[in-house]
Amino acid sequence: MSTYAERLARAMSLRGMSPHTDQSELARRVGMGCKPQNIQHLLDPNKNAKSSKYTPRIAEVLQIDPQWLSYETGNPPMAGPDAVFASPEGATVPVQAKWQQEGSDNLQEMQRRHAEAILSRLNGSDLTKALAFLQELDTPAQMGLSTGPGGGVVIEGGQPDPVPESTKRRMRR
């Protein structure tokens, strides 16, 4: 039976994050007021953390089952594109290299699934920016999109993100 700290460290490693150096990055992605110290506390085996109010969001960010993270029940995490496999000889092989060895079709499928997972978590202006970037990679004619002056892609529809009340108050001052 593993501890919460061990499961969190494993999940971070499988997602290409170092439990030792990427605590700030994970806290930033979790948001909700999560600080690097919160992640550090959860990763410290001496603290014997059982769970956290951030557990559901951590699980979402790391694309793992929150039940597995909290209680080691449910589905264990699957390796992502930045994960590392241990070979029988003890050497580590990046998953990306392993996928390339198994064929580019498998790598492309895994990359596609990873991109879809990222896009599924975006909303508002972040989603619009991602869409604009992706559209630049493809020709407008292939996607049936209109082009603006100078041949640029025109993104139509959508609504701007609402302005938070705190920002409105600052703007009135």
Image (tube, grey):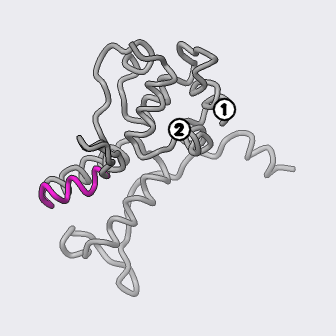
State which tag comes first along the sequence, 2 or 1: 2
Boundaries of the magenta span:
94-105
Neighbour class for label 2 at 10 Å: few (<14), some, many (≥20)?
Answer: many
152 to the left or right of 42: left
On the image, the x and y values in percent for residue 63 come to: 37, 34
On the image, the x and y values in percent for residue 32 come to: 61, 32
Q: Is residue 130 above or below residue 76?
A: below
**Residue 19 marker:** 2
The three-letter amino acid code for the residue at tag 1 is: Gly
104 to the left or right of 50: left
Q: Which residue in the structure is indicated by mark 1? A: 33
Q: Residue at x 45, y 60 (%)?
A: 129
Q: Residue at x 60, y 42 (%)?
A: 28
Q: Which element type, helix, strand or loop, lies under badge 1? A: loop
The front one of 100 and 51 is: 100
Nearer mark to the viewer, of 2 and 1? 2
